[in-house]
Amino acid sequence: MRMFVFPCLALCVAMVSCAEEAAAAAKDKAAASDDKTIEKRGLHLGDYGHHHHEHIKTVTIEKKVPVPYTVVKHIPYTVEKKVPYEVKVPVPEPYIVEKKVPVHVKEYVKVPVHVPKPYTVEKKVPYEVKYPVDKPYEVKVHVPQPYEVIKKIPYEVKVPVPQPYEVIKKVPYEVKVEVPVPKPYEVIKKVPYEVKVPVEKPYPVEVPKPYPVEVEKPYEVIVEKKVPYEVKVPVDKPYKVEVEKPYPVHVKVPVPQPYTVEKKVPYTVEKPVPYEVKVPIEKPYPVYSEVKVPLHKEIPIPEKYHVEAPIFEHHDHHGGGHGGYSHYSHHH
């Protein structure tokens, strides 16, 4: 916004100054023309002055010199005004209030304790102690027969509750306690003032007197003094050093834009409330339910057993000799 206002202001000032210069030039030209006409009239009157003696009128001309002056121009600009609005912060109910309770903390301080040396260490070693007993004796505990077992069976206990049920809720309220204040109220103001303490006479003050102190003779101390000297570091050749050059950076100036403000408006929400609906039934009706009954089903189990291979015999019907193979047997 400022980038736009400053050029406009400079343009307006330049236009005003140009207008003033033009008006001053026009006034100068008008004054010069008036001088010329007055001089001509004076010469014309002078010619007639030889015959007639007339009174010459003097004309004074006031020239207005333009003087620069400041012109205040009203330029409208936007003014940002902060409008407060209500912000609702959700607060949990019941509200948690944290209260700091002081707790006593034991702080251990280390105190030096004298420990004798050598330090004696007592170590307890357990050992068996035999206690002589004459003989084991029998202890008889009476157990009633049959043995009674008490079993607790829960049962319903009906507690009468009045309807409607009364709920007592404590509501805090403000109690005004009047504190008696005297009127007019007395204010005690402490004003400091000087208190002079009288001193009878000056009293003697002991001043420590100087006393001789033996000072040892000084001795020579060798102090190493560092002498700076030039160290030449060989450099191959001059090297380039990069210098950062300034470059223009475009900065985006944010322009205020109208924005939407969301306002929460309360509204009623219909919430369905479940309630019991009693349906009258005329008489009890049978309800059939499926009951699973176990069935025994025989499942065949394959069983392996040995089977002998068959024996094939081949006979020749033409009366010739036995052709091929007469007896073929395969033993498994």
Image (tube, grey):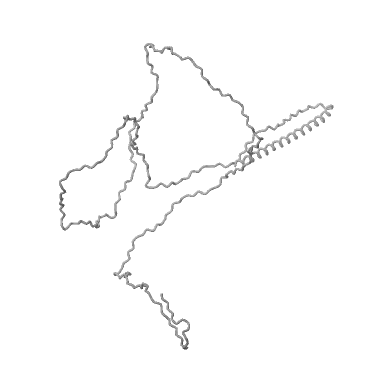
Observer-nearest of 101 and 87: 101
Question: Where 194 sits versus 45, above or below?
Answer: above
Observer-nearest of 50 and 2: 2
Quarter placement of the C terminus: bottom left
Residue at the (49%, 16%) spot, across then down: 219
Residue 159 percent across, percent down from the top left: 25, 55
Question: Where 238 sits versus 55, above or below?
Answer: below
Observer-nearest of 69 and 279: 279
Observer-nearest of 27 and 205: 205
Count every numbered label the image shows and give the total: 0
Residue 213 percent across, percent down from the top left: 43, 13
Residue at the (71%, 36%) spot, across then down: 21
Q: Residue 172 lies in what quarter of the image?
A: top left
* Residue extending farthest front: 321
Q: Residue 274 lies in what quarter of the image?
A: bottom left
Residue 59 percent across, percent down from the top left: 75, 29
Residue at the (57%, 42%) spot, across then down: 78
Question: Where 214 sits versus 301, above or below?
Answer: above
Residue 132 percent across, percent down from the top left: 17, 44
Question: Where 250 sits versus 205, above or below?
Answer: below
Left or right: where 3 falls relative to 104: right
Q: Residue 56 lies in what quarter of the image?
A: top right
Residue at the (32%, 66%) spot, across then down: 279
